[in-house]
Image (cartoon, grey):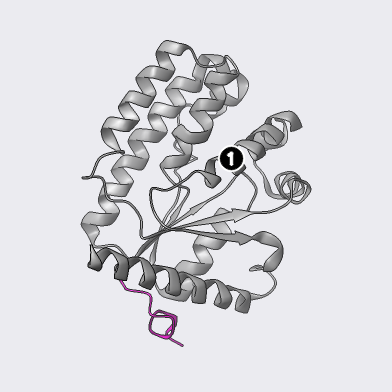
Amino acid sequence: MNFREKYQIPSDSVITIAGTVGVGKSTMTKALATALNFKTSFEKVDTNPYLEKFYADFERWSFHLQVYFLAERFKEQKKIFEYGGGFIQDRSIYEDTGIFAKMHYDNGTMSQTDYDTYTNLFDAMVMTPYFPHPDLLIYLEGSLDDILNRIQIRGRDMEKGTPTAYWEEMYGRYDNWINNFNACPVLRINISDYDLIKEENSIEPVLKKVGHLIQQSRKLTLKK
């Protein structure tokens, strides 16, 4: 079945998946890409030269990690739109500044100077009329207990060894961030409403909502 045609999802759409660690972004990315015959864009974790150092010493490496992510995500976003769309993207560029950098600044693991430098760079690169924003951001959410359980079952070793308080704080910051996010249309999906690993067909209600929101958004854009 051609789900793109059934749910009127344009072939040049760019859909970004957002949500805290352990919420199932990669699984959703793969499922949507398969259903729509789209390409995927995943976070390059294995080649990140700062990630393990960061988890060992937040204060020493937080600025380096954030700048690295910003550069990589910016290049990836540019590539996706130059290609002509048709992508599902695992994690958004907006989460880095709205959640991670601010959390480290607030907690004293990023200096005022580093935080100002990072946010100024982010604003100059991303928060401009020339930066290509996604057609839709799918925000995955669930209970804190469900997410902590997923981290312990499926997470990386460095994540499993991170104190629970860190994930609790991130969970709260994600909730606040998405409630104030307006860079592109948002579809909020609770992870308790589907199980893509056990039930492949549970992706179809998600596709229906995706098609509706993208069509609605593009109609509004044409009217402007």
Image x and y of residue 119, in percent: 38, 26
**Pointer 1 residue:** 176
Q: Residue at x 45, y 51 (%)?
A: 42
Front residue of 222 and 132: 222
Residue 86 in percent (x, y) is at 33, 66
| Rendered view: 153 above or below 30 | above
In this rendering, position of residue 4 left or right of residue 153: left
User: Which quarter shows the C terminus?
Assistant: bottom left
Q: Is residue 206 above or below residue 81?
A: below
Report the front residue among 190 and 213: 213
- Compared across the picture, whether 206 is left or right of 145 comes to left
Q: Main secondary structure of the magenta part?
A: loop
* SS assignment at label 1: helix
Residue at position x 51%, y 72% from top? 209
Q: Nearer the viewer, residue 17 or 42?
A: 17
Q: Residue at x 47, y 75 (%)?
A: 35
Taking the magenta stretch, the answer to whether it contains residue 6 is yes
Give the extent of the magenta segment: 1-11
Q: Is residue 86 left or right of residue 88?
A: left
Q: Is residue 38 visible?
A: yes
**Residue at figure coordinates x 35%, y 38% from the top left:** 72
Q: Where in the figure is residue 130, as x and y percent of width and height?
A: 21, 45
In the displayed structure, would residue 130 be above or below residue 216?
A: above
In the displayed orientation, state which residue is furthest to the bottom.
1
Queried whether the magenta region covers residue 52, the answer comes back as no
Whether residue 165 sits left or right of residue 180 in the image: it is: right
Asked where in the image residue 190 lies, by quadrant, the reply is: bottom right
Total numbered circles: 1
Q: Quadrant of residue 223?
A: bottom left
Circle 1 packing at 10 Å, graded few (<14), some (14-19), many (20+), is few
Task: Give amino acid for label 1.
Answer: Asn
